[in-house]
Image (cartoon, grey):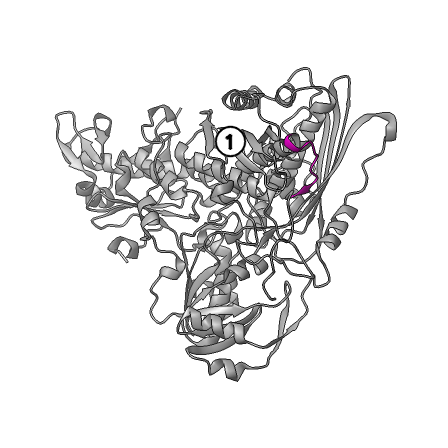
Amino acid sequence: MTRHARRRFLTYLVAAPALAVATKVGVDVYAPGSADAAIPTPPAPADLVDLGDLLILAGKPTADMLVLSVDEDGGVDFRLPREEVGQGLTTAVAMLVAEELDTPLDRVRVHLEDARPELLFNQLTGSSNSVRSLYDPVRRTAAAARARMVAAAARQWGLKASELTVRAGVVIAPDGRTASYGSLTAAAATLDLGSITVTPKNESEHTLVGTPTSRIDARALVTGAHPYTLDLDVPGAKPCMVRRPPTINGTVKSVGNEAAVRAMPGVLDVVVIDSGVAVVAETFGQALDGKNALEVTWGGGTVDTLSDSDIRARLKAATPSLDLLGALVKKVDTEFDFAFASHAPLETNSAVADVRADRAEIWSGLKSPIVAQAAIAQAVGLQVSKVKVHVMQSGGSFGRRLFYDAALEAAVVSRKSGRPVRLMWSRIDDMRHGRMRPATHHRIRATYAAGQVLTFQHQVAAVETDFRHGLGDAVTAAAAGLPTGLGNATFAQTLFLTTVKSPYNFGVTTQTLTEVPLKMHTGSWRSVYSANTRGAEEIVVDELAARLGKDPVEFRRSFLKTERQRAVLDRAAKEGDWGRGLPAGWAQGIGFHEEYKSCTACLVEIDATDPKKPRVTRAVIVADVGRVINPRGLEAQLLGGLTDAISTTLRAGLHIDKGLPLEGSYSQFHYARQKDAPKDVKIHVLEGAGEPGGAGELGVPAAVGAVANAYARATGTRPRSFPVNFDVDFTPFPR
């Protein structure tokens, strides 16, 4: 651990040879830088206030409690109250800090902040909200540090701060005198510099932000030098694995051979916890052998009698028929089913825990560390202040790490076993007992006449999504910002209505959610409700275009609501050479999506000459996300969204059989491999106006529509169940 990492800078300046800035409201004076023919659709709730707006509002009271320090060598340390799971957030934030400080990017070090309860709702990573919520506070914090450095130099030279400039971390006087940040830190931290006006740069002055930049952690990641949770060398921490029940939410009744397992080579302890039976051993191999040897009598789970067909029937029953007008109108009536899907991050669930009688220390990849800290404290019988939770960078999430189950399990095992433990979920654990995107059923009905869409109704039924990870509390805290009409909605419906909206003028448009209360291990999966809901709608848009004798692109163009949207669609059609000739069995497909103040269009080409083995061969993605911090990072996010869409639209899903997913590995959960990804992908970023919009989840829904539409055109079919190829072509692992 470095000298800098040991220091704690919260909301004060430290009188030491290092400057620490923690901006907060009122401390520094902040001066901010200065389809007509279609039947209009009234604004949806998400047009008025989206989920990101609510999360920003909930976090506003503590948004400026950020910690930045400059040391005597001129290095900059920033403590990020969010999780890095591969989305490139640490790089984007480092770019903002370097930009405002006018210091080289390689001098900025970003550290993931430990759980800080005083941040309230401002340490939650999700809903494409991190850059949106951090953009101004990070700039203010870095600008405050820069202003103090310049003020210290001005005091030292007897000049006005306005006469000085900064270049590459060096303050420069008009006569050529220079002072590095490192030489000014002591004065900047200790002197009374009077009232300082903090003014972040105008976007027009940016030289780094907006420039394609490689990740600051890229070398460490590709060389294996970057430490993940199980790479940590916590003294005395022993490997641990858990034997889990044969059905979701099953319970432990008894362990029949505990003594025999304890006697196995390397086994140190056998511990019963709420989610199963843990084996602690000298090596992970010995822990695995021990847990596999356990003979456990299990109690029933919460969905033991249910399989896919049963769940699908319940979902369908929750969406009553929309056919109220019968044959009086021309209409498109459709129903869709989407399967459960695993988050399947490359790094499985893991945690390290050291719980003592009077204190506890936890290391894990956590998107909601404050909630995790409180839950762990309660489970091990300690005050929250006695539980230290370290947030570790993680190898993927897609919503999975909003839940802290591994950290909680590790803490309980450590307390019961009386030793530190390193707990790892196997891949089978992660597939079968991890979180999954809920299955959904969709009923869509669109009416049309005289070339116009008159109504568009979409009923969604979803298996209940578990939101017990802090997001609900944040939205509740911002309830005053909800549009009229959401006051009586459930939390899930509120989230649905503040994320899902139609970009088209389709007359009277309604989108509703009904949850079916099945207690399963569900969770927010990338794009949450939008991936399926808007994906299904984009399929219907193609079918409406066909009914009205219109080209799919021209049809969308005539019904999109804004010029911004049309610019994105037009660019995708142009760059993708929409309408070009393709061989039989090949086709193009297009989809459009708008969410979190951002919009995107995706055009794909597919080879479905063998409908059982379709392959996307080419893709063009265009996006306008407002102000872009790192175009290279944005491109990676959109490419990831395309890969998720290819996977879950064509082959990847979970089969539920008598209360448990059948899939237990990547060989069975058919997420796209390298051979399934298009070699030709072009991504075009349109520089938008204003502040950044959300991007992490933006790319999935449009790509779902594009892939499904391309498959339909190539095969001459109308797929209604996804993934389209969903056979059980494997032998399931034993339960």
Q: Give the range drawn in magenta.
A: 714-722
Residue 347, relative to residue 588: is it above or below? below
Identify the residue at image location x=34%, y=48%.
222
- Residue farthest toward the top in the current orientation of the protein: 37
The x, y position of residue 123, in whole percent, is 46, 49
Q: Which of 127 and 387 is in front in this view?
A: 127
The x, y position of residue 46, in whole percent, is 61, 34
Residue 150, relative to residue 267: is it above or below? above
Q: Which of 78 and 573 is in front in this view?
A: 573
The x, y position of residue 625, in whole percent, is 49, 30
- 634 on left or right of 486: left
Residue type at tag 1:
Arg
Asked if residue 243 lies in the magenta stretch, the reply is no
Asked whether the viewer can see residue 12, the reply is no
The x, y position of residue 300, in whole percent, is 68, 69
- Residue placed under numbered mark 1 in the picture: 618
- 83 on left or right of 611: left
- 344 on left or right of 660: left
